[in-house]
Amino acid sequence: MKAQRTVWIINHYAALESKDGWAGRHQALAAHLGRAGWEPVLLLASTGHPVGIQHLPAWRARRVGIEDGVTHVMLRSPSYVGNGVGRMTNMAAFTFQLLLPWTTRGVPKPDVVVGSTVHPLAAWAGLRLARRHRVPFVFEIRDVWPDALIHLGQLRPNSIVARAMTSLMRRLVHASDLILSPLPGVPDYLERLGAVDKPFLWVSNGAEGEIVAPPLAPPAEDAFVFMYLGSFGNAMAVEHLISAFERVVLARPETKMRFRLIGDGPRKTYFERLAAETEVADQITFEPRIPRGQVVARASEADCLVHSLHDHAVYEYGISPNKLFDYLLAARPVVFAANVRNNPVSEAHAGHVVPAEDVDALARAMCAVVDAPPEERTAMGARGGRT
């Protein structure tokens, strides 16, 4: 007889400290479930994301290990670059391997299976495994498909792929026993799919305070430092941050300023070229991506942290970006440009929130932080750190 109930959590891109240098949402969720009396098993691919780097040697098809009390099963999936055929092959290979009987050999059988997006094929495999073991299926919707791809301009609304994705999402929603999501507005999406009475649980992303070890020191530079940490992808309106910074510098010539952008992604080269064409190019620097565990400490080197999203309808369901929680933990004022359903910066009273796509409003908010007395900026950051 089993001493504990076992939960299998399937997420293709689950991040592990040993693999990615930081522990992501699903490792943390599994660890908390373990401390609550469950026996968690995390099933993930051997490749990282977004770069698709392979983390298993050529001779290994899977690796079973334990981190922070969580058993993980890492399945070999082919390396890839970008979002083309290589990534599609990677997704298909991971999904196929999940369904092979040997994949979970030696792992306790589940009492419940959680199938998580990003891509719905992995969640579909989770449904098949739940049916195989005759246990409840929990569907975690982290991204609303195909809406996210449509609003990012990567998919046509009436394309075959969009219709197929909608059909698959509808099937997963109706077949699930519970819907889980970090987006509080997902019930609106469920209503669109005809599942208005489906049980729903909102579990936000977040950051645990204990990762901030020593007390945060004040910024050491003589210049006022704006900072962006995160990815350089299509969803991030980094071009607006660059334009707004240029306007702030020109509006406050008496104040020495710098803008540090830290991270990686497919549009980084484009943003570097854009920054080089501004009148303040010598005050803008791009730095490499850093491990997740260093983000809060690096963010504390700023006087103001900035983030900007494009105006996409998909954000009506809500947001839960890890970077905003890291920003709040860094105890620095935050300027955030977005049209979203829920806004951690507003809820914490930790800075200024302005409409998406409004560069003038973004620049005014950044100027307001520059002009604010040091004690006011300290109070803003402290409110975020306490949230």
Image (spheres, helix red, strand yellow):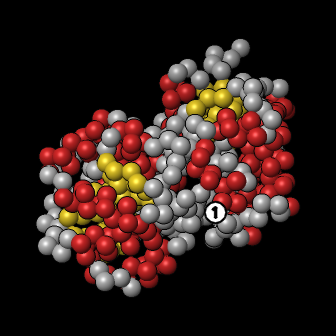
Q: Nearer the viewer, residue 25 or 107?
A: 25
Q: Nearer the viewer, residue 70 or 22?
A: 22
- Asked whether residue 259 is in view, the answer is yes
Please tell me which residue is depicted at 82% across the width and 47% down the height of the picture.
168
- Asked whether residue 75 is in view, the answer is no
Please tell me which residue is depicted at 78% across the width and 32% down the height of the picture.
195
Where in the figure is residue 29, as x and y percent of width and height? 54, 34
Please tell me which residue is depicted at 84% across the width and 47% down the height of the picture.
167
Where in the figure is residue 340, as x and y percent of width and height? 52, 48
Q: Residues within 10 Å of mark 1 (few under 14, many from 20)?
A: some
The N terminus is located in which quarter? top right
Quadrant in which residue 125 is drawn? top right
Q: Is residue 41 above or below residue 284?
A: above
Where in the figure is residue 357, as x and y percent of width and height? 48, 63
| Left-right relation of 279 to 58 | left
Q: Is residue 192 above or below residue 13?
A: above
Where in the figure is residue 286, as x and y percent of width and height? 37, 73
Q: Nearer the viewer, residue 354 or 65?
A: 354
The C terminus is located in which quarter? top left
| Residue of label 1 | 152
Q: Nearer the viewer, residue 83 or 306?
A: 306
| Left-right relation of 126 to 230 | right
Task: Give the mark count.
Answer: 1
Please tell me which residue is depicted at 38% across the width and 66% down the height of the picture.
360
Residue type pointed to by label 1: Leu
